Amino acid sequence: MNVALAHRGPDGAGEFHDAHIALAMRRLSIIDLGGGWQPLYNEDRSLVLVINGEIYNFIELREQLEKKGHRFRTLSDGETILHLYEEHGLDCVQHLRGMFAFALWDARQRRLVLARDRMGEKPLYLYECNGMLLFASELKALMRSGAVPFELDPGSIDLYFHYSWIPEPATPIKGVRKLDAAHLLVVDVEPWRIQETCYWRMENAPLLTGNPKELILAELEAVSKLVIRSDVPVGVALSGGFDSSAITALAAREYPNTMQAFSVGYPGHPPCDERKDAKALADSLGMPFHDVELHTSDMVATFPKMVYWRDDPIADISGYGYYSVMKLASEHNVPVMLQGQGGDELFWGYDDIREAVRQTERLAKFRKTGWRMMPELIKERLPQTLDPKKWYRWLRGGAGISEALAEYQDVLHRPRDRVCFYDLSGGFLQARKEMNKWYSRTFRESLNNHDVHALFTIPQPWPPLDLLFTKLICDTYLRENGITQGDRLSMASGVELRLPLLDHKLVETIIGLRKTTPDHQLPPKAWFKSALSGVLSDEVMNRPKQGFAPPVQEWYRALFKAYSRDLDDGYLVKDAILSPDGARHLAQGEMVTGVVHPLSFKALVLEEWCRMMRA
């Protein structure tokens, strides 16, 4: 199992064995290069710790603990957890600021404590069977144990085809789950007992009043000081967009050495190539700039391996850009990278999430008015023009009445607890409309009326919708697509990724302010941009978002040309997930207008994932 994680820790390994437990870890040396080897122990070695991640406030914690008489063996950030546990027990996690997944063995109590950070930056997979618990940072390590059968979970696979990823805590493998973010799992072995608790909830942030610009900037500056702590070089993944530019500018002001910037581009410098803008910012900050050009042929050759590195099946065509920028950093001996993930989710950067709030508000309004909503629905369909041809077509089409009736029926039949969310996306709608045609009969029967809407079916009364949707997008798309890809595709090159915008103190500040001053009707990222005014130029702040967006159509065509045969009579057919006709249809690589990640691409990713994970 530990060998399967060698890419996450290329600098060495450590192990611990006791009567009830065996721990193993791989080390990527970031803090205390010479002395911070794991496992870590407390003073009398009754506590043992292995940890993946970084505790950003370890210096402050160490000072407090030493004043209370604790004696440290190393300068490692992780060792603070052992002494916090001695002081506070399970509440030790409340004092940690950073990203982490750890396992702490309490030999005296014969107790194992597993914990995961608040926003889920670091992963932890679990498999329980017959009085045994296996856990690991990646699914591939669990599969290497030989104790976990490779058996796909039908419900999870159905979710994958609807979302392009599998919502946590589910995984594609039957019986394997993830420890959810901000959760503790405590295992007592005598007698055997497992308890799981949540220790933090975003929505419980205290009310906060004050100037959002000042309060958010203060937290951004505070985390920028913490997140650069490292005994090895720190770099930044820099596109031309606002989020990565903000992180770059803030961190560069605090970093004691010369920070380096890394970016990607494409042959011929198409519109999605942001290297020029990224380099301009790096040059203005006196920051060395490195870039790599992504060629379609290289992406195609790397595709199966990259699917494997992602650990979960994630159908996101942009992943190769993130993988390449981290590989570039590794080649320049920069093992710590900063990235701007979280800005869109926390500051209303996605138009479709703003629309989901609007549609849910509209839905709630129409439910209250009942049939009295009809005049408004008809009025909405009036042509907004004096063009007689459009008025004529409107009249011939029934003056909007049939369309209004159809929407009225939708409102009446929609479950009351279901908000508008992913059912507004083209990919979800395509799967809901078509996937049953392509599944095998056996697979359809195994789903047993599986509800793909459960993710956004939330018992009423609902909290304020701006708070609900912030949590919803952070707990779903951000964590399982953005954070998961970021962690796995950086660690594939032995690079630690840090996401300053996901600092829990910053998140609490945003949510606390939102409770008193809703901002979802302001322009996108209004608070974030206000906080950064004076730090970044107006040109950077108003530039359209692209990130590491690839030439999508060209890449799709190349991938299906190279790998479409794998779908014909491939694993998904042999395992009776797709019917033979369904596989042949999806192997054609059909693209659908308005759908970024079509069913054909989702099937191709899942096929390659199964082949790589079973190898």
Image (cartoon, rainbow, N blue to C red):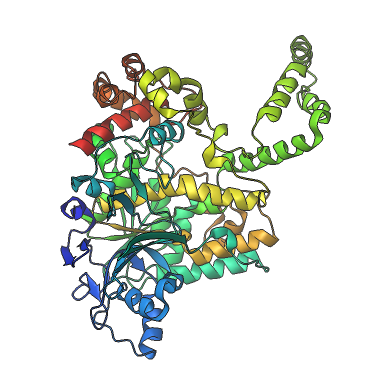
- Residue 581 image position (x, y, % from top left): 34, 13
Image quarter in which the C terminus is found = top left
Please identify the quarter of the rendering in which residue 611 is found. Answer: top left
Residue in view at x 24 percent, y 52 percent: 493
**Quarter of the view holding residue 377:** top right
| Residue 268 in sight here | yes
User: Taking 250 as reference, is 178 left or right?
Assistant: left
Q: Which residue is depicted at the point 21% across and 59% down?
A: 9
Location of residue 181 in the rendering, given as x and y in whole percent from the top left corner: 43, 56
Residue in the picture at 33% in, 39% down: 174
**Residue 220, relative to residue 304: is it above or below?**
below
Residue 243, placed above or below residue 270:
below
Whether residue 407 is situated above or below residue 187 in the rendered picture:
above
Residue 291 seen by the camera: no
User: Residue furthest toward the front?
Assistant: 191
Which corner quadrant of the image does residue 67 belong to? bottom left
